[in-house]
C-alpha cells in the first residue's frame, strides 16, 4: 500500500500539534509496512502513483480543493476540526474584535485566508475556494471524502452539526511515543515541582490568564513553546506580565529529550486553552507523572474523562483553583496507565491503516 499525505504549506515553518500528528502517524505506518510520502499542499503531485491520498486540517479547505479536482484516487481527511469562535468574539480587541463579533466563524476563516495572503504572502492555491466561500468549501471536501478521520467522536459530532454533513468516519486517536516519554528518562531537577504549560504562545492557548492565575501562589511556572508569528503582541504582553510577577520562565526551544526530563521533574501540566481537540502535551505530561489541568472546551473530556482537573479559560479564579488542587494532590497513576493503554502512536497507525483498508475495499467493490 502506498499513501500520499498532504499537509499545509506551513507545516514545518510554523509547527504545531498537527505537525507531530502527521509525522508520527507516517512514521508508525511505515513500521506497519505501509509506504508513506509526506508533502506540502503547495506542491504539484503525481496522485496516480498512490493508492490513497490523506489530507489534514479540514478547516483549511483552500489547501485541499486544488488536489481533489478531478481526482480519481480515493482520499480521506484527518479533520483536526477546532472552533476558536468563542475566543475570537470575547478576546479580540480593536477592529479585529469588532469584525469577529459581527461575522460568522466561516466568514472569519475566509477573511483569515485573505489576510494570510496579504500579510504573509501565503499563496491561495484555489480559485474554487474564493468562489465557494469557506463554509461550502468545507462541506464539499467532507462530502467528497471517502472517510473522515477525527481524533474523537465528539470532534466528528461537532463538525457534523456545524456543517450539516453525514459522511462515514472513523476515530483515530492523538497519541504519544512511549519510547520517548519513558519513565527511564532522567530528571531535570532545576524544574522540580514546577507548573508547566507546553504549546505555541498565542491568545487561544491562554498563557496570559495562566500567568495571572498563578501570581501570588508561590508556584513556579515554565512556559515552553515558541510564539506564534501572528501573535507577537500577545507574546510581549505575556513577557511583560511575567516580569512583573517574577515566578515565570520562558523556554522557547527545547529538544524532546530535555522536555521529557522537565516533565518528569514538574508537578502539574496546564492547558487552559479556549479550545483543544486533545492537547498532545497533556498526554505527554500525563505519562511522565504530572497531574493534568485542561479546559473542557473541545474534546478533552473524551480523552481524560474524570482523571484530570478542569478549568474555565475565561475565569482566572477557576484556573488558579484547578492548578492548586492538582498541585496539592498525589500523582494520578490511573491516567498514566490509561494513556499508555489507549493513546500510543502505534495504536494511531493501526486505526489509520484499518481506515485505509476499509476505504480501498469499498472503492474496489
Image: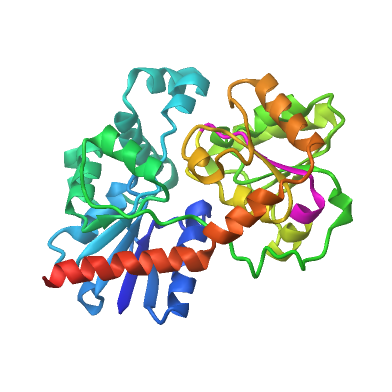
Vertical placement of residue 310 versus 186, above or below = above
Check residue 314 for magenta coloring: no
Q: Describe residue 202's horizontal placement relative to residue 183 as left or right.
A: left
x, y (%) of residue 122?
Answer: 38, 49
x, y (%) of residue 318?
Answer: 66, 22
Residue for point 77% across, 30% down? 324
Residue for point 84% across, 24% down? 216
In the picture, which quadrant includes the N terminus?
bottom left
Q: Describe residue 88's horizontal placement relative to residue 169 as left or right.
A: right
**Image quadrant assignment for residue 56:** bottom left
Check residue 268 for magenta coloring: yes
Vertical placement of residue 319 versus 109, above or below = above
In the picture, which quadrant includes the C terminus?
bottom left
**Image quadrant assignment for residue 242:** top right
**Image quadrant assignment for residue 357:** bottom left
Vertical placement of residue 198 versus 98, above or below = below
Frontmost residue, 223 versus 214? 214
Q: How is the image coloured?
A: rainbow
Residue for point 22% across, 57% down? 66
x, y (%) of residue 170?
Answer: 32, 55
> Would residue 23 be visible to someone looking at this image?
no
Residue sitting at the far front:
334
Vertical placement of residue 48 versus 229, above or below = below
x, y (%) of residue 93?
Answer: 51, 20
User: Which residue range is magenta in the image?
Assistant: 262-274
> Would residue 233 be visible to someone looking at this image?
yes
Residue for point 44% across, 21% down? 89
Amino acid at each position: 500500500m502506498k499513501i500520499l499525505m498532504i499537509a499545509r504549506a506551513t507545516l514545518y515553518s510554523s509547527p504545531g500539534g498537527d505537525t507531530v500528528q502527521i509525522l508520527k502517524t507516517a512514521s508508525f505506518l511505515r513500521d506497519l509496512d505501509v509506504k508513506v510520502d509526506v508533502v506540502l499542499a503547495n506542491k504539484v503531485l503525481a496522485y496516480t502513483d498512490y493508492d490513497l491520498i490523506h489530507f489534514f486540517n479540514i478547516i483549511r479547505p483552500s489547501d485541499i480543493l486544488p488536489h481533489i479536482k478531478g481526482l480519481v484516487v480515493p482520499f480521506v481527511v484527518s479533520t483536526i476540526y477546532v472552533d476558536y469562535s468563542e475566543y475570537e468574539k470575547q478576546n479580540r480587541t480593536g477592529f479585529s474584535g469588532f469584525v469577529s463579533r459581527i461575522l460568522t466563524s466561516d466568514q472569519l476563516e475566509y477573511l483569515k485566508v485573505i489576510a494570510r495572503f496579504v500579510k504573509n504572502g501565503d499563496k491561495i492555491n484555489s480559485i474554487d475556494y474564493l468562489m465557494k466561500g469557506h463554509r461550502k468549501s468545507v462541506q464539499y471536501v467532507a462530502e467528497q471524502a471517502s472517510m473522515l478521520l477525527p481524533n474523537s467522536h465528539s470532534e466528528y459530532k461537532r463538525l457534523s452539526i456545524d456543517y450539516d454533513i453525514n459522511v462515514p468516519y472513523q476515530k483515530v486517536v492523538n497519541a504519544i511515543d512511549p519510547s520517548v516519554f519513558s519513565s527511564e528518562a532522567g530528571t531535570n531537577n532545576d524544574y522540580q515541582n514546577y507548573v508547566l504549560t507546553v504549546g505555541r504562545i498565542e491568545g487561544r492557548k491562554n498563557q496570559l490568564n495562566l500567568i495571572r492565575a498563578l501570581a501570588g501562589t508561590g508556584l513556579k511556572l515554565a512556559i515552553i513553546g515558541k510564539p506564534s508569528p501572528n501573535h507577537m503582541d500577545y507574546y510581549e504582553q505575556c513577557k511583560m506580565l511575567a516580569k512583573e510577577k517574577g515566578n515565570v520562565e520562558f523556554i522557547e526551544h527545547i529538544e524532546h529529550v530535555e522536555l521529557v526530563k522537565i516533565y518528569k521533574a514538574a508537578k502539574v501540566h496546564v492547558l487552559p486553552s479556549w479550545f483543544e481537540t486533545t492537547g498532545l502535551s497533556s498526554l505527554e505530561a500525563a505519562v511522565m507523572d504530572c497531574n493534568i489541568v485542561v479546559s473542557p472546551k473541545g474534546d478533552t473530556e473524551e480523552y481524560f474523562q474524570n482523571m484530570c482537573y478542569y478549568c474555565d479559560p475565561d475565569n482566572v479564579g477557576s484556573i488558579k483553583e484547578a492548578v492548586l488542587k492538582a498541585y496539592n494532590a498525589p500523582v494520578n497513576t490511573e491516567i498514566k496507565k490509561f494513556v499508555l493503554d489507549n493513546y500510543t502512536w502505534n495504536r494511531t497507525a493501526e486505526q489509520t491503516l484499518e481506515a485505509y483498508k476499509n476505504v480501498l475495499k469499498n472503492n474496489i467493490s
